[in-house]
Image (cartoon, grey):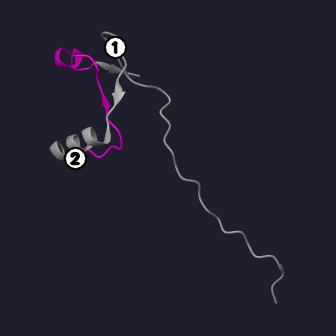
Amino acid sequence: MPKNKKPRKKYTPKPKVKVIEKMPYCKICNTDTRLATNYELMDFKAHDPSFNLPMLFLPQCDCWEQHDEWMEL
């Protein structure tokens, strides 16, 4: 006979949601970056199959063309 008459509650894990605490910005001209849309992310993954991150930050300025390290948190 079971010791408890009440059935156990089933454990359902909470879904993991990533929250972006800090947005990267251009450290040369201090403009903010933006998140890529799903279409832009799919295009980028089609050109670079080794990219496997769930998000991509895109610059809104042209500083990345002249400087290698332009992004900062």
Mark 2, secondary structure of its residue: loop
- In the rendered image, the vertical position of residue 9 relative to residue 3, given as above or below: above
For disc 2, the neighbor class at 10 Å (few under 14, some 14 to 19, many from 20) is few
| Most common SS among magenta residues | loop
Quarter that holds the N terminus: bottom right
Quarter-of-image position of residue 24:
top left
**Considering depth in this image, is 36 or 48 the residue closer to the camera?**
36
Distance of mark 2 from mark 1, alpha carbons?
A: 27 Å
Q: Is residue 4 left or right of residue 25?
A: right
Mark 1, secondary structure of its residue: loop
Query: What residue did someone put label 2 on?
Result: 50
Kind of residue at badge 1: Lys
Q: Position of residue 64 (x, y in %)?
A: 22, 19
For disc 1, the neighbor class at 10 Å (few under 14, some 14 to 19, many from 20) is some
Q: Which residues are magenta?
A: 51-69
Query: What residue did someone put label 1 on?
Result: 27
- In the rendered image, the vertical position of residue 30 relative to residue 35, given as above or below: above
**Considering depth in this image, is 71 or 41 the residue closer to the camera?**
41
Kind of residue at badge 2: Ser
Residue under the point 52% across and 49% down: 16
Residue under the point 35% across and 27% down: 34
Q: Position of residue 53 (x, y in %)?
A: 33, 43
Q: Is residue 33 left or right of residue 69?
A: right
Q: Position of residue 31 (x, y in %)?
A: 35, 14
- In the rendered image, the vertical position of residue 15 relative to residue 18, given as above or below: below
Q: Which of marks 1 and 2 precedes in the sequence?
A: 1
Residue under the point 61% across and 62% down: 12
Q: Is residue 24 left or right of residue 11?
A: left
Tell me if label 2 and label 1 are in contact, CB under 8 Å: no
Q: Furthest-top residue in view? A: 29
Q: Position of residue 51 (x, y in %)?
A: 25, 44
